[in-house]
Image (tube, rainbow, N blue to C red):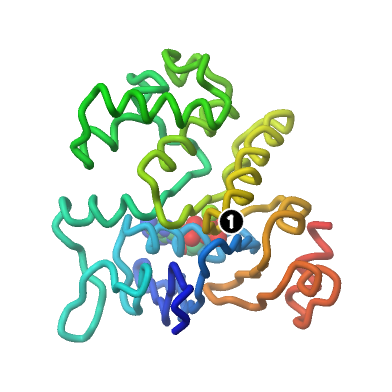
């Protein structure tokens, strides 16, 4: 184990109704690393992120955050559900951004960003608002703070969702196809926010179909297929000199 690893996943398995979706996934994400994950639909990418974000338990395997095992384990070492309160505390360390924003529709942008601060961290309303406004400014939305999600474009909603995750000061950010639900003209503004975040040294995993973005921003690219990692490497190596037939075939479809 390197001391630099922020997130480590060991031999992660997950089945749904007897259907093996993750079949032994293993990798490390080092501090400041930007890992792009590519792969066909149904290959288990979202499942992997949900497990890492502690949104559901793995069947077996381990997840370590900064050297600490997260989740809990039974006598076989299997990961189990923790009490909701404890999970909420551990989840703050792992920011997750979904394909479909998942904002609360009845709350304004700033209220959406404040919610985790007041409910989980117990920060005062006044202080939470100040931090949320600061974060909205960082994603270029300080003038949309009092808008409801329905009054915002998809790109703006996704930037609010990014601010909501960032305001909790996570150790790692997980993005699950953050631009897939957006109209093409709105993709750029979201990718730009993510790219700027990468430049600040944020550790992140980005599941994406944006190959050019992956090449430019990631320092490691991973191909996921059938619940396992097929290939991973530096972007130049991965895109220009893939080692596996599966990777060559995948790239021939997306290029
Ligand atoms: P990807 O994000 O790569 O498209 P997913 O992780 O969403 O893949 O899904 C992988 C497989 O797991 C798919 O066959 C999907 O139908 C199945 N799956 C995902 N979540 C569930 C669930 N909650 N219940 C049952 N099957 C699921
Ligand atoms: Mg998915």
Seen in the picture, residue 116 relative to 197 is either above or below; the reply is: above
Q: Secondary structure at mark 1?
A: strand
Q: How many marks?
A: 1
**Quick check: 246 left or right of 91?**
right
**Quick check: 169 left or right of 241?**
left
Quadrant for residue 154, please give it: top right
User: Dot 1, how many residues are within 10 Å of its Cα: few (below 14), some (14-19), or many (20+)?
Assistant: many
Residue 61, percent from left and from top: 35, 79
Q: Nearer the viewer, residue 137 or 186?
A: 137
Q: The N terminus lies in which quarter of the figure?
A: bottom left
Seen in the picture, residue 134 relative to 84 is either above or below; the reply is: above
Q: Judge: label 1 CB < 8 Å from ligand 2.
A: yes
| Residue sitting at x 60%, y 29% | 155
**Quick check: 38 left or right of 133?**
right
Residue 114, percent from left and from top: 32, 29
Residue identified by numbered label 1? 207
Quadrant for residue 56, please give it: bottom left
Q: The C terminus lies in which quarter of the figure?
A: bottom right
**Quick check: 35 left or right of 20?**
right
């Amino acid at each position: 184990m390197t001391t630099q690893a922020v997130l480590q996943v060991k031999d992660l398995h997950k089945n749904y109704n007897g259907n093996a979706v993750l079949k032994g996934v293993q990798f490390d994400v080092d501090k400041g690393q930007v890992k792009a994950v590519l792969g066909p639909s149904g290959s288990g990418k979202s499942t992997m992120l949900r497990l890492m974000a502690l949104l559901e338990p793995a069947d077996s395997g381990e997840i370590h955050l900064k050297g600490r095992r997260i989740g809990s384990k039974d006598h076989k070492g299997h990961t189990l559900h923790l009490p909701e309160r404890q999970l909420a505390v551990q989840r703050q360390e792992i920011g997750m951004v979904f394909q479909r924003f998942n904002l609360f529709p009845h709350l304004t942008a700033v209220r959406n960003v404040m919610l985790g601060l007041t409910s989980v961290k117990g920060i005062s309303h006044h202080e939470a608002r100040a931090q949320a406004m600061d974060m909205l400014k960082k994603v270029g939305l300080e003038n949309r703070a009092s808008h409801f999600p329905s009054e915002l474009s998809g790109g703006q909603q996704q930037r609010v969702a990014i601010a909501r995750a960032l305001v909790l000061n996570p150790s790692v950010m997980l993005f699950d196809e953050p631009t897939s639900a957006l109209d093409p003209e709105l993709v750029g503004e979201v990718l730009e926010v993510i790219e700027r975040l990468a430049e600040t040294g944020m550790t992140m995993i980005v599941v994406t179909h944006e190959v050019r973005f992956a090449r430019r921003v990631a320092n490691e690219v991973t191909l996921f297929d059938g619940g396992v990692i097929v290939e991973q490497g530096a972007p130049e190596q991965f895109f220009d000199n893939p080692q596996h037939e599966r990777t060559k075939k995948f790239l021939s479809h997306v290029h």
